Image (cartoon, rainbow, N blue to C red):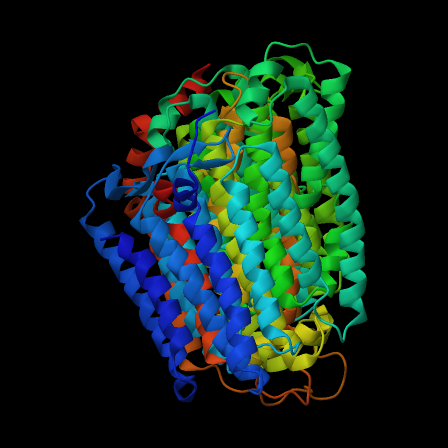
Amino acid sequence: MLAWTIYISFLGALAVMLLPKRFARGARVLALLAAVAGFAVSLMVFAKHPSGELVTVARTPWVPSLGVEYHLAADGVSLTLLLLTGVVAICGVLFSWNIEHRAREFFAFYLALIGGVYGVFLSFDLLLLFAFYEIAIVPKYFLIAIWGSTRREYAAMKLALYSFVGSAMVLIGLVAAYVVAGAKTMDLAQLAQFPFSIHFQMWAFPMMFVGFGILAGLWPFHTWAPTGHVAAPTAASMLLAGVVMKLGAYGCLRVAMMLFPRGLDPWGFHVLGFGSWRDVFALLALVGIVYGAMVALVQRDFKFVIGYSSISHMGFVLLGLMTLQQIGVDGAVLQMFSHGVLAGLLFAVVGRMVYDRTHTRDLSELERMHLSKVIPFAAGTFVLGSMASIGLPGFSGFVAELQILIGAWRAFPVFAIVAGLGIVIGIAYTWRAMQKAFFGKSDRGAAAPVSQLPAITIPERLGAAILMGASVVIGLYPQVLLRVIVPALRSPLFEGLWRGSSR
Amino acid sequence: MIRVNYLDLLHLILPEAIVVLAALCVLAVDLMFLRTSETRVRGFVGGVVSIAGCVAAVVWILHAPQSANVLDGMVVLTPLIERMQIVLLLLSILTILMFMGSAFTRHVCEYLTLMLLATVSVMFLVSTQNLLLIFLSLELLSLSLYVLTAFNKQSGRSAEAAIKYFLFGGISAAFLLFGFSLLYGLSNSTNLVGIAASVHGRMLDPLLVVALVMTLAGLGFKVAAVPFHFWAPDVYQGAPASSAAFIASSSKVGSFFILYQVMVIGLMGAEGGAAWHGYASGWVPVVAIMAAFSMVLGNLVAITQSSVRRLLAYSAIAHTGYMLVGVVSHTEQSFIALLYYAITYALTVLGAFGVVSVVEEATGGDTLSHLAGLSRRAPVPSFCMLVFMLSLAGIPPFAGFFGKFYLFSSALTSTPGTLGLLWLVVLAVAMSAVSLYYYLKVLKNIYVAERPPDSAPIGVSFIRQIVLCLIALSVILLGCAPNLLLRWL
């Protein structure tokens, strides 16, 4: 049944594309229906799913001569991310309700992207996973290049090339693993059981991790992300930050770490103080956290602030993964959900509520507009969203980052302290952006230059409410998700990982 | 030598005979009944007759499958070879269908005749394992292609391209003949199997090395591998679209098939190795180097092209590089992977030339800026082009992706235990990441760029739209269900 999330999205894309020109405005309704249906399906399965055990959704031979299967399955981690995809997809459509320019194509690409994302989260055959992973690249390019804003063609091409380079690295690792195992299977569970030689894992793991990490915003390969987020239309930046970056993190966990757990083992010697790939990537994640936050602190463009904050928050996810502590990895998965929802919300406020009305994202110009008086709803949403994003208790960000920090404290105490510093800087940049964008001082004399902006529409209110609600629910009662995440991470599939951590 | 009577021989080569007959019919019908008709009518009737001939040949092959190996390997028929012949015939049918309406010449029926002769020559090419017949069919193919290239008499480019093609082709044919004669001198046999028997176990003496290099030079020219690729950009750009499409599709498939046969069957004893830490001199390292250079040069130069045809030419050189990886690994599996790749590539590039010619007929040029805003002027061809370009870049779910995956994984499997060809595979994957840039550039102009202010929607003939959709659909289908083709090969 879960497989229908994929089919619904692709069929929806097809239907939207084939819509006659007269009904172009129906495209958004159709897209909304498809997104809601996808979410409903995953919610239904989620509700019926007692624990995070692996359930097979579909399994048939695909290319028998190569042992490749069409194998869809879901466990707690996938379910969590499927829910996230559903939520963000619905809100993305709601926040692009005002798209008129080539609307059918917009929603067709949008749904194709969603379909690819669902596919990645559900695939349990490596080739299938990779295929969906790449399917998700192309629509992103067009969404940004056609409907984007600042330097859109440059940003779109940069994003596509970065993603493709990343996936090329993944492909090499995949093919090598397939050939070395020699068992004529691409099944993730079976390959994970294969004892790859430590020598092989030592080069295959970092290659795959970096390959997926590029999409997860791993510093220093993150530069596609801010430009991409800024150039993208609102819905696309919501998807990019909300879901697509999670694809990378999910790939790191599900493929790189699960296939090659021993790649995280100590090298047995030290170079520049690093003793293993785990140290290296943990440091890169940490640099991402602090660097992203510091760069966000000095941005003049409102959207760049959120763009760089995404790098910082994704750094937490990667740091959580590298702790190799149960609690840290739980936190990382939770953070994927939390950041997905919150980044979506913040991008929606900046891109749709503010930029589409004021046509500027320059903080110093916004400062003069008194937006808190003109569009109080946007100001209120942004305040709540940023509170959640800096990790105020009661919102999802808190639970997730707390778990990651505890995990990091156990694994690398010094890093945990620096990451805590990153959170403090996070408060600073969020505060600064909020202050400048919405609560500017009126020291420039004359009355506010902007007196009247279009009111916030109902779809926008609805979308904001859904995203906010999701964050609050998880913040108040994280057990909703943790009840499926924790058993999934305890399952035998990830056994190799924990064995590694005890060494 | 086994004796065969002529009737049996005719029976074996009946498909080729049917196509030759069709070629003569096309000429005769044109000469006798259509002298006063319009060019369009003549093109239509000629096209129908040629297609009927090809279909008849396909039906005959399907109806009476045979296997044979007669006259010292002159005619070899196996199920695989017969299927290749069917593929080549289908490619010709698609080419003829797609370009039935294009009117660049008054001599449509002569053009079709040459096209059919070229088809016959590739059919012979795949069904022989004898040096003599290989050379003859290669020459027949080349001669037809030279004329096909020059066929647009109004265009200086066409003539220039043909001259270049002819000069390069002539020299490379001389190389090939020289190489073949040395091989014959070494082994006293023109049969590939016989050559293999005498090459086997012999040290790699200088004579064999010369023979090998000469042969590779001649065949490398046919598949447009670096450093024998110089003709490709000019020919792809100057030739009429249908000729270029034929050169890029059928001719490429046939040439790769025979390259593989000559190397793997004929020179089995002298293969050497190109694995990392496993180098041994022979033809494999030479082909590996050609592959590496083709990939790098093709992809890097394609980035700077502004003409879509030249871009396709350099991308063809790059794809030759990928396909040569299949020759380097030379296992049974990699042969199937190579054929899958070559066939799907041929389909894709055929479709791409179809779209290019749609654009050329409407806007008069083939540069990237002529494509601007095409998606709003001709949505169906644009969508087909999206499929073709992404398939060439190797994006799933299109056939190009699975082809690459299969080819590269079989290359890694060919050196069991040691991933010896990893260096070549890494290079190929890295280069295909580069290639996405220029394929996306084409698509950017189609989908993103604004259409020129005075542009009207482009009308595309019904047949051409159907053919384009058919090809796009098959590229998608073969990508989603590669088994359809793999099981059949």
Residue A35 seen in this snapshot: yes
Q: For residue A27, which quarter of the picture?
A: bottom left
Instruction: Name the spot of residue A492 as percent of width and height, x first.
Output: 30, 26
Instruction: Name the spot of residue B118 as percent of width and height, x first.
Output: 58, 55
Q: Is residue B61 above or below residue B22?
A: above
The residue at the point 38 percent across, 55 percent down is B58
Name the one closer to the observer, A243 or B320.
B320
Give left or right: position of B210 versus A255. right
Q: Could you tell me how many numbered marks the image carries?
A: 0
Q: Is residue A387 above or below residue B85?
A: below
Q: Is residue B488 above or below residue A173?
A: below
Which image quadrant: the C terminus of chain B? top left
Residue A432 seen in this snapshot: no
Name the one closer to the observer, B45 or A485.
B45
Instruction: Name the spot of residue A297 as percent of width and height, x first.
Output: 69, 55
The residue at the point 18 percent across, 49 percent down is A48
The residue at the point 42 percent across, 34 percent down is B4
Q: Is residue A414 above or below residue B158?
A: above
Name the one closer to the observer, B465 or B255.
B255
Q: For residue A22, which quarter of the picture?
A: bottom left
The residue at the point 55 percent across, 48 percent down is B122
Name the one closer to the observer, B413 or B47.
B47
Instruction: Name the spot of residue A171 as percent of width and height, x first.
Output: 53, 38
